Image (cartoon, grey):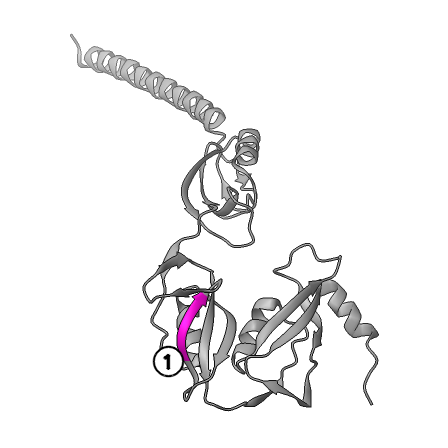
Amino acid sequence: MKFSQIFNKNRSIAVTVLIHLALVVVVLLVLLLIFSSIQKVYTHYGEALTVPDFTGYTIEKVEQVCKEKDLRFKVIDSTYAANTPVFTVFEQSPKPNSKVKRKRMIYFTITTDKPPKVRIPNVIDVSLRQAVTLLQGFGLKVGEMKYVPGIAQNVVIRIERKGRILQQGTLIDKGSYIDLVMEDGESAEMVPVQDLAGLTVEEAMFALSGFALNVGGTVYDKMVKDTSRAVIYKQSPGPSDDNIISKGSSVDVWLTTPDNYRNILKTKPVEP
């Protein structure tokens, strides 16, 4: 066989091999494109969903919305939140307005009707200011401040709740009000009345506690729906440099909505 014949034969084989390789590559590319297209359709590739704000939703509502949005959800924790409807969403992850794919799992913390328990700290024989700080540090609130005759002044001698004497270390619901009983130092010390306008009841109680005064009667007008957000627009006795009352006394307050309070300020005559 001549050299030219051998060369032509080998070249023919090489061309055939190359053609087959090219066909294999083309087939693989086509299969890859088909697989990729199927995967995009199945996974909704490139399609992002906006996570709704589920705050305040019941589990039934969450289930309905997640079904509509093609999302999944799981409750992983519970917490107590005062003035919040129980068994509703308190926190979520991912956060509202996050971009996620379909079938994404959304994790929820819901509210519960059982507040956590805390132990009452030792506030006996400490000053009023220290007692307030300690109680607030444990998530407790200062209720009424009472005075009895005694040598020490503004020093806590016992703590009460609804007339019952409490002991250090007693387990109690977080957020509970604790009444403080103090000695008056055998004096009828007088303190000025503070201006409580624009404060909530919680803020007013804190402001008055520094002067050993209490919030007395609370009157809400008809517009108030959420008492925790209502603000004081009137008080008795009113604030005045000449208006002083004895420690342990109470200040009555009238409350309205924040919006109405702003309207009251606009219509209030300017003092000369």
The x, y position of residue 195, in whole percent, is 66, 80
**Is 112 on the left-hand or right-hand side of 97?**
left
Q: Which is the main secondary structure of the residues drawn in magenta?
A: strand
Q: Give the quarter of the figure containing the C terminus.
A: bottom right
Q: Nearer the viewer, residue 102 or 42?
A: 102
Seen at 42% across and 20% down, the residue is 30
- Note whether 61 is above or below 31 in the view shown: below
- Any magenta on residue 25? no
- Any magenta on residue 159? yes
Q: Nearer the viewer, residue 252 or 181?
A: 181
Task: Give neighbour class at mark 1: few <14, some 14-19, many 20+ (Cα, 10 Å).
Answer: some
**Is 61 on the left-hand or right-hand side of 135?**
right
Q: Which residue was labeled with disc 1?
A: 126
Question: Which amino acid type is marked by label 1?
Answer: Val
The x, y position of residue 236, in whole percent, is 70, 77
Q: Give the quarter of the figure containing the N terminus.
A: top left
Q: Which residues are magenta?
A: 156-160
**Is 172 on the left-hand or right-hand side of 96?**
left
**Count of labels shown?**
1
The x, y position of residue 28, in whole percent, is 36, 20
The x, y position of residue 168, in whole percent, is 33, 67
Q: Nearer the viewer, residue 225 or 247?
A: 247
Seen at 27% across and 16% down, the residue is 17
